[in-house]
C-alpha cells in the first residue's frame, strides 16, 4: 500500500498538526502481516517531507509533529527518509510511485492512496487553492494535492487533473504494472473526467464525487487486505467502511467505485450524446434548457 499525503496546507496546519498525527498513527495501527505500507507525508511548513516504512503500533500519540521519528522507531535513513518539499510537482509523484512499484516487484496487489485537498475537474477550487502546477499543464484545470511550501519560493502549487494522469500513467508504464486500486482521498475527485485520465493506471478507482471528510480510518481499511481479494473486492469493502463511518457520525457523503476498464467505451458513448445535444441546441434550446432545469442534481453549488 503506497500512500502519498500532501498536508502542507490548512489540513496540516489545523489543530497543531492533528491530521498529520491521526493519518500516520491510523496507518500504523492498520499495518499487519503480509501488508507493507510506504507513506510519503508532507506536513505544514518547510523541511518536514519524508517517506516512512511503517510498522504496526497501536499508540495514537507517537509519531507526532513534535516527534516525527517517534524516538528510535523511524531512524533516518532506515525506516524514514527525507523527501522533496515540492510534493505537488508531477515529477515528484511520478518518482515516488515508480520507485515504490519497483521496490516491491513480487507484491500480489498494489494499492495507491493519494491524500490531500482536491476539487476534481473544476475551475472552482477551494479558496486560496492554486489552480494548477506551473505552465506545462496550464491548459487543464482541476486540482489535487495543495502544497503551500514547494521549497523553491514559487508559492503554492497544486496538481492538475492532466498532470495527475500523466504522472501515474508514466510511472505504471515504467514499472510494468497498474494498481489494483487507486483511492483518491480528497474532495470532488470521483468525477468521470478524473477517472478517464487515470483509466490506464489502475483497475479500480475509489473517490468521492463531492465533499470528502478526512476520516483517515486506515486502521479499519488496511486489515481488509487479504489474499484472494482483488481491486474490486477491496474497493467495495473500503467504500462500505467509509460510508458506515460517515453515516454514523452524520456527515453527508458521496462515494463511488469506478471500473476503469469501462471508461473508454463510456467516453465514446458520452461524446456521441454530447454531439447530438449540441446539434439539437441550434433548433431546440428552450427544450434542452427545460430538461436541464428539471434534472436532479446534488451538491452542485457547495451549499
Image: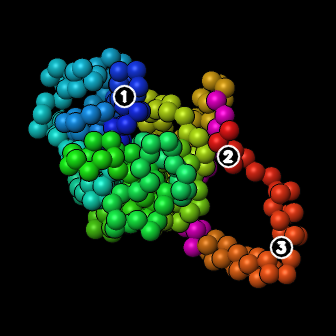
Q: Is residue 176 visible?
A: no
The residue tagged 1 is 13
The picture quadrant where one finds residue 117 is top left
Which of the colour schemes (rainbow, by chain, secondary structure, one colour) is used?
A: rainbow
x and y, in percent, of residue 186 in the image: 49, 43
Quote the CA–CA distance across marks 1 and 3.
48 Å
Crowdedness near tag 3: few (<14), some (14–19) or many (≥20) residues, C-alpha within 10 Å: few
The picture quadrant where one finds residue 201 is bottom left
Q: Earlier in the sequence, mark 1 or mark 2?
A: 1
Relative vertical location of residue 263 with respect to residue 61 in this rendering, above or below:
below
Q: Which segment did they paint magenta?
A: 251-264
Q: Is residue 14 magenta?
A: no
- Residue, x 66% and y 34% (percent of image)? 252
Pointers 2 and 3 in contact (C-beta within 8 Å): no
Q: Nearer the viewer, residue 96 or 28?
A: 96
Q: Nearer the viewer, residue 11 or 254?
A: 11
Please state the total of marks drawn on the protein image.
3
Q: Which mark is residue 301?
A: 2
The residue tagged 3 is 285
x and y, in percent, of residue 296 in the image: 80, 52
Amino acid at each position: 500500500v503506497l500512500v502519498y499525503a500532501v498536508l502542507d496546507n490548512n489540513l496540516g496546519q489545523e489543530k497543531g498538526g492533528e491530521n498529520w498525527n491521526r493519518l500516520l498513527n491510523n496507518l500504523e495501527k492498520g499495518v499487519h502481516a503480509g501488508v507493507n505500507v510506504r507513506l510519503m507525508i508532507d506536513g505544514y511548513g518547510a523541511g518536514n517531507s519524508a517517506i516512512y516504512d511503517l510498522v504496526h503500533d497501536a499508540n495514537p500519540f507517537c509519531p507526532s509533529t513534535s516527534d516525527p521519528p517517534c524516538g528510535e522507531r523511524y531512524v533516518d535513513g532506515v525506516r524514514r527518509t527525507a523527501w522533496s518539499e515540492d510534493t505537488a510537482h508531477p515529477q515528484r509523484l511520478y518518482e515516488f510511485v515508480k520507485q515504490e512499484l519497483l521496490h516491491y516487484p513480487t507484491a500480489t496487489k498494489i494499492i495507491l492512496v493519494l491524500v490531500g485537498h482536491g476539487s476534481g475537474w473544476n475551475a472552482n477550487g477551494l479558496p486560496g487553492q492554486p489552480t494548477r502546477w506551473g505552465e506545462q499543464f496550464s491548459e487543464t484545470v482541476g486540482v489535487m494535492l495543495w502544497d503551500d511550501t514547494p521549497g523553491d519560493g514559487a508559492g503554492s502549487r497544486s496538481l492538475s487533473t492532466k498532470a495527475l494522469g500523466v504522472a501515474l500513467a508514466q510511472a505504471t508504464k515504467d514499472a510494468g504494472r497498474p494498481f489494483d486500486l487507486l483511492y483518491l482521498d480528497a474532495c470532488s475527485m470521483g468525477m468521470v473526467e478524473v477517472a478517464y485520465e487515470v483509466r490506464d493506471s489502475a483497475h479500480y478507482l475509489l473517490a468521492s464525487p463531492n465533499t470528502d471528510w478526512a476520516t483517515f480510518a486506515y486502521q479499519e481499511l488496511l486489515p481488509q487486505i487479504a489474499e484472494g481479494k482483488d481491486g474490486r473486492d477491496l474497493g467495495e469493502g473500503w467504500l462500505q467502511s467509509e460510508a458506515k463511518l460517515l453515516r454514523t457520525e452524520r456527515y453527508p457523503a458521496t462515494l463511488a467505485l469506478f471500473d476503469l476498464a469501462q471508461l473508454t467505451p463510456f467516453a465514446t458513448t458520452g461524446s456521441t450524446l454530447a454531439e447530438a445535444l449540441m446539434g439539437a441546441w441550434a433548433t431546440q434550446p428552450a427544450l434542452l434548457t427545460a430538461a436541464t432545469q428539471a434534472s436532479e442534481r446534488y451538491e452542485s453549488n457547495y451549499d
